[in-house]
Image (tube, helix red, strand yellow):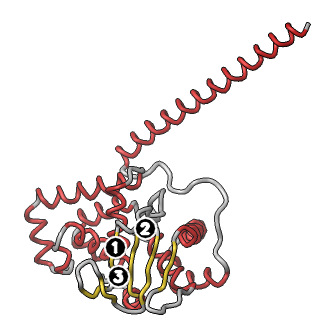
Amino acid sequence: MNYLILIQDDAMASKLILGFLFAILFYMMLHYAFKMYEMTYVMKNKKPLYRHGIGWLRKLPDTQKKLLHQEFSFFRKLKEKEQRYFEHRVASFIKDKTFIGRDGLNVTDKMRVLISATAVMLTFGFRDFYIGLVGKIFIYPDQFFSNANGEYHKGELNPKLGALVISWKHFLEGYDIENDNLNLGIHEFAHAIHLNSLKERDVSSTIFSDSFRELTELLSNEKSLRERLIESQYFREYAYTNQYEFIAVIIETFIETPHEFRSQFPQVYNKTKQMLNFGFAGY
């Protein structure tokens, strides 16, 4: 009798193990099929299949939510549902990053909220919005001495240290005039997103890097468009320093004067919009 029970127990255990293995195999097949479907969708539509996951959305404390609403105009342009997702992303970004004050600067809620909101704004069209390349954000009260080249900077990205460094004074000046195409926070986070897209292979990073490649090919192949860009002086001269500065400047311009950008250079505007997957807030 005991022998029969042992046989039955072994048979049941074998069935459970086999069922578990089949479940894993089925999950892997579903996952692979979804990835293939999404890849086809991305190649056809140049955007992710979805941006926001399903689940609990983080909320900011009331004081931080008030700062976001009062001092970040982009947030006010969003629809109510989009604002909930934006708030969740800002709260998640704040939790994910380490904010460090330098030269005696005390990091405040305003700093955390506005800096995080800038990053979230630029990645609001992405699925992965964390910009994994950046783990620490150093904030100086004013311009700071950089050991990288022995000069004073207003902003700096250090990929090796996973750090973004900014002058708080000049960060705020970037939002004082919202249509001068000059915004330190946007510029530095654009650098971070660009370099992060070269490092990561998630859907949004792939779309960003592929779209930028398409943009550079467009400008390489169309001499007249390239000449019009330079002659117009719409993009400040610093944009033509190298490809990294070019992409940062066009993103600054895209955010601050989208209607003028679209009117003057619709092809470049559309490629930038595709890079960032912007389909909200009037863009």
Q: Which residue is mark 3?
A: 184
Q: Amino acid at mark 2?
A: Val
Q: Which residue is mark 2?
A: 134
As shown in the figure, which amino acid type bears the numbered disc 1? Leu
Viewer-nearest of discs 2 and 3: 2
Looking at numbered disc 3 in the image, what kind of residue is underneath it? Answer: Leu
Q: Nearer the viewer, residue 172 or 52?
A: 172
Q: Is residue 173 left or right of residue 263?
A: right
Looking at the rendered image, the quarter that the N terminus falls into is top right
Crowding at mark 3 (Cα within 10 Å: few <14, some 14-19, many 20+): many
- Between disc 1 and disc 3, the foreground one is 1
- Residue shown at 26%/68% (left/top)? 247
- Cβ–Cβ under 8 Å for marks 2 and 1: yes
Q: Which residue is mark 1?
A: 157
One can see residue 79 in this view:
no
Element at label 1: strand
Mark earlier in primary sequence (2, 3): 2
Q: Is residue 143 visible?
A: yes
Q: In the image, what residue occupies the spot 15% across and 72% down?
A: 229
Question: Disc 2 to disc 3, how far (Cα)?
Answer: 16 Å
The Cα atoms of the two marked residues, 1 and 3, are separated by 12 Å
Query: Quarter-wise, where is residue 213 in the image?
Result: bottom left
Instruction: Provide residue 165's location: percent of width, then percent of height.
Output: 38, 79
Q: Tell me the tag on residue 195.
A: none
Local secondary structure at mark 2: loop
Q: Earlier in the sequence, mark 1 or mark 3?
A: 1
The residue sitting at 50% across, 78% down in the picture is 99
Horizontal side of residue 6 vs 193, given as left or right: right
Query: Dot 2, how many residues are within 10 Å of its Cα: few (below 14), some (14-19), or many (20+)?
Result: many
Residue 9 at x, y percent in the picture:
81, 16
C-alpha span from label 2 to label 1: 9 Å
